[in-house]
Image (cartoon, rainbow, N blue to C red):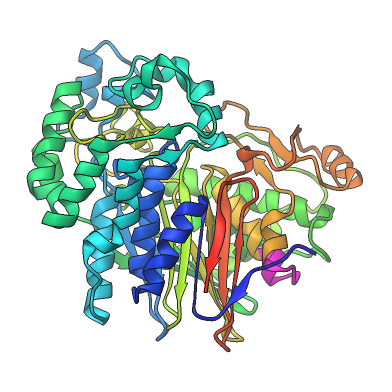
Amino acid sequence: MLNTPRSCRGMVTSPHHLASQAGLDVLKAGGTAIEAAVATAAALAVVYPHMTGIGGDAFWLTMWPDGRVETIDACGAAAQKADPAFYHAAGLDTIPWRGPLAANTVAGTVSGWDMALSWSHAMTSALPLGRVLRDALYYAEQGVPVTDSAANLTRAKFDELKDVPGFRDLFTPGGRLPQPGDILHNPRLAKTLRQLADEGLSSFYRGNVAREIAADLNDVGSPLALADLQGHRATHQPALHARIHGADLYNLAPPTQGVASLLILALFDRLKAAKADDFDYLHGLVEATKQAFRYRDTHVGDPAYMTVQAQDILDDRKALDRMAASIDPDRAAPWPWQSQAGDTVWLGVIDSDGLAVSMIQSLYFEYGSGVVLPRTGIVWQNRGTSFGLDPQGWNGLRPGRKPFHTLNPAGARFDDGRTMVYGTMGGEGQPQTQSAIFTRYARYGMELQEAVTAPRWLLGRTWGESSVSLKYEDRFDPEVIARMQAAGHQMERVEPFSSTMGHAGALVRHGSGLLEGATDPRSDGCVAAW
């Protein structure tokens, strides 16, 4: 059996071991789970730059010891100049995935840090911001070893990124592709982080840092302007929630796909599956995913433009019963459906008081737009490439509109007193991996680390790939795979522990105060605890 780390005083899990340690050090210094989450997130922006950065978006799910669950939407909207006419004038029928024209939405991550820290500071005395950002500053200035995953992805995506402004200078110094163990420095980002520590995080949007960012964006040819940064605010909103046997589940409201993650678990709760990883289990979760994705792709986007409330479907027991009853226990429903891509990092922190944080931040694709801003060293996201250029269509581009997001950090409270935070990167795979981890642990009693390490599947595409088959890691029982094929699923084998299956993690706090954690062997992460 795989070992599940345990402790009682505090625990952090993230997809990079240095970032987990940065968060743990903040807990040891007397910081809250929120302060530790910001420290972890900031470190990830430096040590895992292919996956995340302060030029992206973020979402927070915060579970307070008194039972409250609060969320933060730190998603940036489209620039005021970014409308279909802007792209048509450039001779484009679609928004490009890379380059300055892909950098068309405000980066919301830092605003989420700011709001979360304000919550923490209202609860207890604050650590200095410079202390929270200390490790991120160090790694940006002094350097950090390049991971295997970063080296491999840089090599794989170099042809589409090599001509993007700033990319080669930072990530291929001297024109040489990075090798695992090379030391990556980003002194311009270190300067930006130091400015934020000195001036406050709001400087990113309405201070000296904002003015430098706006000048950078203008210089590279992005449609974003200072007014777009100044107009941005993170928002506080209620969590989506769903009730299943033995637990209350929580996730993020639109523009995220959190409703899809909750729908999968609510539907599977109504299905029969005697044990994890047999045919009924895998088939049931895949078919529940199809139902959830159809709902998501029909209804979910910027809530200002939605015609339904996402919570309504989760509260409608009869509708959920009908959706579950429509699942054929023996045959696969037709597929594909519209598919989304993505890239991201998830992290979790629980402190000694029982405050639990589930947080996710992203650049969208690996390295986002690829644009590295010349003054600030910030890699800017390409989340706005998910917009279509028909403003009346699903997720149609309009100035000030928020893009659809795959990001959705999850949490649960069990009737027996346990609190769980969990999540993953991986676009379409996020709701599916969440369902695998949660059901294996909660319904079938797997150890937490085993639930994360066990083989996974992915219906649809991720990481910019076009395949929409049902991919599976080659560690399932061959008889189960044969039955899935016989049931009509289009199966595609991938290597064991494939990064295609995302980088997941989970933390659980028991009523006794015992903490349990898990990290993904597919990542460079670890559980850091004391």
Foreground pick, 201 / 473 = 201
Foreground pick, 489 / 194 = 194
Indicate left or right for 310 with 211 as reference.
right
Residue at 34% in and 73% down: 31
- Judged from this view, the residue extending furthest toward the bottom is 512
**Tally of numbered tags:** 0
Q: Toward which corner of the image does residue 438 lie, by quadrant?
A: bottom right
- Judged from this view, the residue extending furthest toward the right is 479
Residue at 80% in and 56% down: 277
Instruction: Give how far across and how far down residue 245 sits, in percent.
Output: 65, 77
Instruction: Give how far across and how far down residue 120 sits, in percent.
Output: 28, 74
Instruction: Give how far across and how far down residue 167 sits, in percent.
Output: 34, 23
Q: Toward which corner of the image does residue 429 lie, by quadrant?
A: top right
Indicate left or right for 408 with 465 as reference.
left
Looking at the image, residue 339 lies above or below residue 453? above
Instruction: Give how far across and how far down residue 189 sits, in percent.
Output: 26, 40
- Judged from this view, the residue extending furthest toward the front is 142
Is residue 462 visible to the viewer in this orientation of the structure?
Answer: no
- Judged from this view, the residue extending furthest toward the top is 91
Whether residue 385 is in magenta: the answer is no
* On-image quarter of the N terminus: bottom right
Q: Toward which corner of the image does residue 508 lie, by quadrant?
A: bottom right
Foreground pick, 505 / 27 = 27
Looking at the image, residue 502 lies above or below residue 80? below
Is residue 47 visible to the viewer in this orientation of the structure?
Answer: yes
Residue at 41% in and 59% down: 22
Indicate left or right for 294 with 246 as reference.
left
**Start and end of the magenta stretch?**
439-448
Whether residue 444 is in magenta: the answer is yes
Residue at 38% in and 66% down: 36
